Amino acid sequence: MSEINKREEGFEKKFALDEEQKFKAEARRNRLLGLWAAEKLGMSGDAATAYAKEVVAADFEEAGDADVLHKITTDFAAKNIAVTEQAIRAKMSELLAVAAAEVKAGK
């Protein structure tokens, strides 16, 4: 195998690993976000865990974060919970950093 082929294969493996870690971090972020939102909605225990799973599942409806954001803002509105979209986006960013660190650490 030539040196160029080895380097190309290395880049492809790194790209695949990076994408896998990104996917895991986003899924973990969504779970953490779901638990945060569940607490705001007055849920705990199994109900909070189930809600967090719904938030994770919502992310598969369309590309990007809009589907997760829509689910949470809709659920907050239904319960008259005043949390702005900007506040939710800020929490998403905060939790993505936490989730990425956890994934990188192998948790």
Image (cartoon, rainbow, N blue to C red):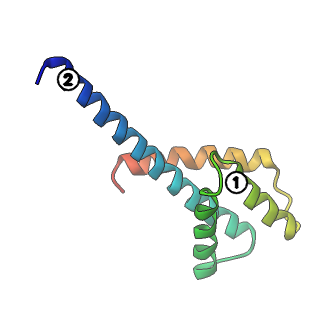
Residue toward you, 61 or 72: 61
Secondary structure of the residue carrying numbered label 2: helix
Residue 87's disc is none
Which corner quadrant holds the C terminus? bottom left
Q: Quadrant of residue 81?
A: bottom right
Secondary structure of the residue carrying numbered label 1: helix
Residue bearing mark 1? 67
Q: Residue at x 66, y 48 (%)?
A: 65
Q: Residue at x 65, y 51 (%)?
A: 62
Residue bearing mark 2? 5
Image location of residue 98, percent across then percent down? 51, 48
The answer to whether residue 63 is left or right of residue 82 is left
Q: Residue farthest to the right? A: 80
Q: Residues within 10 Å of mark 1 (few under 14, many from 20)?
A: some
Instruction: Identify residue type, mark 2.
Output: Asn
Residue toward you, 67 or 39: 67
